[in-house]
Structures are given as structure tokens and as C-alpha cells.
Amino acid sequence: MKHYDVAVIGTGPAGLGAAFELLKERPKTSLLLLDKNEYSSGGLRNDCKMNFSWPIGFPEHCWTEGEAGSYLSRVEGFLKPDILEKKNLERYSRRAEKIGVSLLSVRQSHLGTDGGLALIKRLVERLKGLGAEVSLGETADELDAEKKVLRTDKREIEYGDLIVAPGRGGFSFLQDIMAASGVQYQDNVVDIGLRVETREEHYPIVRDYYDPKFLFPKKTRTFCTNSGAASVVQERYDSPLGTPWYSVNGHAWSSSRPANGLVNFAILKTVTLTEPLASGQAYAQMLGVQAALLGGGKPIMQRVGDFRLGKRSTRAAFSGDLYDFEPSLASATPGDIGLAAPAKTLRALWNAMKLLDTIVPGLLHPSTIMYYPEIKLYANRPVFKDRSFSVRPGLYLVGDGAGTSRGITAAWASGIRAADGILGKL
Ligand SMILES: Cc1cc2nc3c(=O)[nH]c(=O)nc-3n(C[C@H](O)[C@H](O)[C@H](O)COP(=O)(O)OP(=O)(O)OC[C@H]3O[C@@H](n4cnc5c(N)ncnc54)[C@H](O)[C@@H]3O)c2cc1C
């Protein structure tokens, strides 16, 4: 059985951040980085907009502002992003303030999906050049944390330290690992929301601020705005009920591709389940399956014009003169989001959209499309033993799947923090 000083599961930003830091500080480390996908995947390859300001992407239960700031400067020092200019925001901020909404000023860069793919390829080649063994198309299956043995679909390996960074898609895998290794965790928080798609002229703020971050009352916020050559996409998840469900998401290509005149962004509400303490994942899966049932196995889309009139959208509503742009996720089913989403959540989301329409008038044009559901499963909360995200000797859980991040830069920072733990720096 081959032995590695450090094995890393996942080549997303959390895994990459850890690997680069370890090899920088201890170049002789024998390091295996494995990923079940044939090429390094994760968020770096989806739109790849990076946020370099607190608290964007940093869950406050495991980061302080000071910690995040110091790790963000290390991430920025490594990735050397081109920070986008923001302009003309005063009037939006003033309007927001008057109605109890905050517009956060965030340092951002944007590579686009094609730019992100090119970055991943460069990073993986660089890691190989530093001596890391990168094994793509290899899935981690099981862990014996006592013996420090990892079983994959291809072999068994021994490790000194293991960093597990499987992202949101690895949410269940991570729960299996925690259960098998006796690690306590909670996953009682989930973000549920909509993806909004409209013409750029109905949401022109994106010309001045690529991904404007608004915070509304009732733990509701805008998230992940895409424009230029922008599309809504769907992600498939499997539920224990045996039926798949879909969450929508969005991305954009870099400015080298022709723009399609559309903008999309999510409006998400954070839901925290308390008494009795239920699993956020199980709740989200139920909602996802319900939406898939009503959407005939697809996400549901509804024009704002129909939603306001309290009627479902139909295919015809996607071709009338008021409804004058084609949905970028054309396979979604026109329907009635009100039948699928919990009333309390939908009220908060709709209220946020009305507030946003007051700040950026035009958003609620009848043609604007709402896609449902957009669900974020990044709320595993393992009980960490220390600040390095260690859960037992030699085992570190980081990134979106472990709830230590909600975005690329915080995931990268989480990886560095685990590496700091291994290096004895914390
Ligand atoms: C469509 C889309 C667009 C997004 N856009 C942005 C954006 O613009 N900006 C932003 O900041 N964030 C964005 N995000 C979120 C961002 O992707 C995540 O916050 C970030 O990638 C989390 O990093 P991570 O390293 O924790 O996990 P990931 O990046 O998800 O990487 C996890 C890796 O682990 C691998 N893996 C999982 N399970 C196993 C296993 N059992 N064995 C081996 N390998 C495994 C996966 O294949 C994957 O490559 C987007 C997400 C999506 C889905």
C-alpha cells in the first residue's frame, strides 16, 4: 500500500489552496491530490468570479473578520486577480439604505467559465511541477481514520494527514465519513431561493458592479450575479427517495464571448431549523423532490407577470409580446412556483425582489423569469477540534461541503488554514 505524507480529496479551490501551501512550505512532502472527475472541477470552472471582501463566502461561525482578512490577502497574493472597477453606486446605496437594505461593496474579479477552466489547467500543471501526484478520475470511497487508510475505487492508500474537500456535491460523502469516523456534526441550516433572469436593461447596475451583493431583511440576499454571455443552468442531485432533483444555478463566459443581453442572479433565504433539530439536507431534498414532481422532473420557471396575477406560466407565456426573451434554461418547465415553495420562504424572496425593484427599478418587468429551486447545501457543521478545521488527529474537513466556505476565495482560504494546521503554524 502506497504511503503519502498528505492526501487531499477534491481539486476545488479548498484542495488546491491546501496543496499549494503545503508544497510551498515543505517542498519534499509526498502529496496525493485526487478527484473523481476527469478534470479538476468545482467552482473555479463555473463563472469563476472571486470575492475578496469580508464576509462574502465566509461563514461567521468559523471565521472572524481578522482571520478572513489575513487569509484573503494570502489567497489574493497567490492568485493575483485583476480586481474589477465599481462605479456610480452612491444612488443605489442611498436608495437601499432608505428601505432597510444594505449594498455591500466587494472587491471582485471575474474570469468567466472559459477563463476559470484555463486557470484550473495552469494550476494543476503547476502542482505537478511542484512534485504533487494528481490523480483525476479516482473516487474516494471509504475511510478508516483509526488506521489512516483511504479506500478509493482504484486502490487503498495510507496517509499521514488527510484533507477532505469534496465540495457541495460531496455533502453526503462527507456525512458518511463523519459518521464512520465518529465526528459529530449538525446540518440544520440551508439556503433556499430562486434564480432571477432578466434583460440587462432591467438590471443595469451590473454595468457598474459585476456581482452586486444586497442584504435584505429576513436573512435574504442576492448571490452569484452573472452577465455578459450569461446562462442559467441546472445541477442534478440524487435523493435517498430514489428520485433525482435539480437545483438551478448560473454562470457566464468571459468577455471574449458575445454578450446575450441577459443577467441572472440568485435570491436566497437562509433557513435555520431548530426544535426538533432536523437535517437541512433532508429538508432541502424534500423541497427539491417536490419541485421536480411539480415540474415533471425539471426545475420550474415562471414569468413575473404571471406570478403577480397568481397564475401559472405556460409555454404560451414564454412567447407573448410582453415576454420578449427566451429563457436561457429552456428545458425548465413553465409552472407555478407558489405550489412548490414554502409560503414563508417565498414571501421573504418576493419581498426582497420588490425592495430590489425599488432600488433598481425595472427588475420586476413582467418578462423577468424566476426559476425554482436554487438550493445551497453547504451547511454541514462538523465539531472542529481547533482552528485548522481538524476533526481528529490527521483528519481535516474543509470547503463548502464542510461548511467552512461559501465561495471560491473562502474555500481556498480554508485549505490554507488546514495546511497551516498540518505545518504546525496555528
Ligand atoms: C454553477 C456554479 C457556479 C458558481 N459560481 C461561483 C462563482 O462565480 N464564485 C464563487 O466564489 N463561487 C461560485 N460557486 C461556488 C463555488 O463553486 C464553491 O464555493 C467552491 O468551488 C467550493 O470549493 P470546494 O473546494 O469546497 O469544492 P468544489 O470546488 O466543489 O470541489 C470539490 C471537488 O471534490 C471532488 N469530489 C467530490 N467528492 C469526491 C470523492 N468522493 N472522491 C474524489 N473527489 C471528489 C469533486 O469532483 C470536485 O472537483 C459556483 C458553484 C456552481 C455550482
Image (cartoon, rainbow, N blue to C red):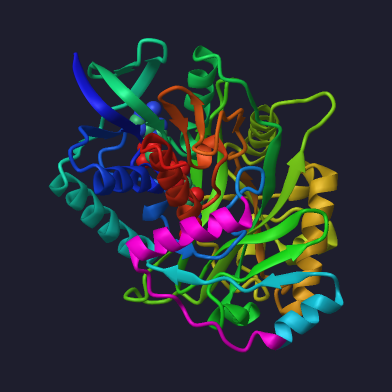
Q: Is 76 positioned to the left or the right of 291 in the image?
A: left
The x, y position of residue 198, in whole percent, is 61, 70
User: For this rendering, which residue is in front, 193 or 150?
Assistant: 150
The vertical placement of 414 against 136, above or below, is below
Q: Is residue 418 visible?
A: yes
Q: Is 224 positioned to the left or the right of 110 in the image?
A: right
User: For this rendering, which residue is in front, 3 or 358?
Assistant: 3
Q: Which residues are magenta?
A: 64-90
The vertical placement of 51 against 204, above or below, is above
User: For this rendering, which residue is in front, 179 or 269?
Assistant: 179
The vertical placement of 149 against 134, above or below, is above
User: For this rendering, which residue is in front, 408 or 48?
Assistant: 408
Q: How many marks?
A: 0
The x, y position of residue 100, in whole percent, is 84, 70
Say which quarter of the image contains residue 295.
top right
Reply yes or no: does residue 351 show up in magenta.
no
The vertical placement of 277 against 229, above or below, is above
The x, y position of residue 121, in whole percent, is 23, 53
Q: Residue at x 80, y 42 (%)?
A: 342
Quadrant (top left/top right/bottom left/bottom right) for the N terminus: top left
The x, y position of residue 21, in whole percent, is 32, 47
**Looking at this rendering, what residue extends furthest in the front direction?**
425
Q: Residue at x 61, y 80 (%)?
A: 205
